[in-house]
Image (cartoon, rainbow, N blue to C red):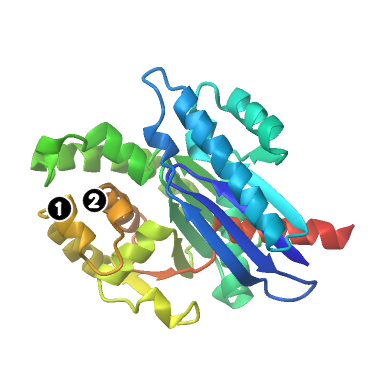
Amino acid sequence: MRMGVIDIGSNTVHLLVVDAHRGGQPQPAASVRVPLRLVELLEADGSLGTEGEQALTACVRDMREQAEALGVQDLAAFATSALRDASNGDQVLARVRAATGVGIGMLSGEEEARLTFLAARRWFGWSAGRLLALDIGGGSLEIGAGMHEDPEVVASLPLGASRLTRDWLAGADNDPPRRADLAELRRYVRAQIAPVVGTIYHLGEHTRVVATSKTFRSLARIAGAEPYSRGPYTRRVLRRDDLADVVAKITRMTVEERAALAGVSASRAGQLVAGAIVAAEALDLFSVEEAEICPWALREGVILRRLDWLNSG
């Protein structure tokens, strides 16, 4: 079966198309990304305005047409942090559904963490033991931990790279970011993550830590990991000591200088510092020496869950 999923994230709207069958690994067939940056289109009152809604509607309609042209037989769509937090998110999605004919679900933060954890578990398998999975998105940080496919502890925190950049590091006069702002951001991030640490350690020590998302991939690449062009089966890790060096380096750079680094796109360079601080504080608080980069994340989790549901039927 050819399946597709439209991920309406805080930064990007992403169509992923895979070929999947019972008992087999979903194989990617096509991938289309549009850097819509919904989190930056929110109005001062927290709502998504007319411009943002129109852009989203046109994007979803175009992706539905591309999915049809690619022969997708089962198309799912979901929205995450930007619309979840928008004061009119439910109303916007209802209008987008009506205009495009695409059923779009709103994932809660916990659902997002669970599906990302499922993808990591399926990728690494049971031999990975007790997993701790970390995912930094545009609007939130998702954390999941446990021994099974359904994590025993999940958390979704307002620590997305775009959100923190907007709230803490914005402004042309803050490039490179001021040390005082960085110090305040670190304190805020640690205060958000700290309560989760005890609940996860109560389960027992994790045997493998995995990290997903573009932020972690970019940081690992800067730290010396193999480029993604080498394929998903190449092992890539991000060590805590190396990450500390990366943070020290990129916080002294301008956005343009960060965009020139290997593995960093121009569209993500502006939020890389905030994402790096979240990554560094998470690894420190969870006493992680090394996190392994997982090529599967939320979109694959949605596909795997849907495939399980279709097969069970």
Quarter the N terminus occupies: bottom right
Mark 1 or mark 2, which has the lower sequence index?
1
In the structure shown, which secondary structural element does the residue marked by tag 1 occupy? loop
Image quarter of residue 182: top left
Q: CA distance from mark 1 to mark 2?
A: 6 Å
The answer to which of 274 and 102 lies nearer the viewer is 102
In the structure shown, which secondary structural element does the residue marked by tag 2 occupy? helix
Q: Position of residue 112 (x, y in %)?
A: 57, 47
Is residue 171 depicted above or below 179 in this figure?
Answer: above
Q: Position of residue 168 (x, y in %)?
A: 24, 35
Residue at point 70%, 49% (across, down): 76
Is residue 275 depicted above or below 43 in this figure?
Answer: below
Crowdedness of circle 1 by 10 Å Cα count: few (<14), some, many (20+)? Answer: many
| Amino acid type, callout 2 | Val
Left or right: residue 182 versus residue 198 is left
Residue at point 66%, 61% (across, down): 149
Left or right: residue 159 versus residue 60 is left
- Asked whether residue 150 appears in the rendered view, the answer is no
Residue 296 got which mark? none
Asked if the residue under mark 2 is in contact with the one under mark 1, i.e. CB atoms within 8 Å, the reply is yes
Q: Position of residue 255 (x, y in %)?
A: 18, 51
Crowdedness of circle 2 by 10 Å Cα count: few (<14), some, many (20+)? Answer: many
Is residue 182 depicted above or below 53 in this figure?
Answer: below
Residue at point 22%, 68% (across, down): 241
Q: Which residue, given by chain and number where applicable, does mark 1 sit on?
A: 251
Quarter the C terminus occupies: bottom right
| Residue situated furthest right in the rendering | 313
| Amino acid type, callout 1 | Thr
Q: Which residue, given by chain and number where applicable, does mark 2 sit on?
A: 273
- Asked whether residue 260 appears in the rendered view, the answer is yes
Q: Position of residue 24 (x, y in %)?
A: 73, 76
Image quarter of residue 293: bottom left
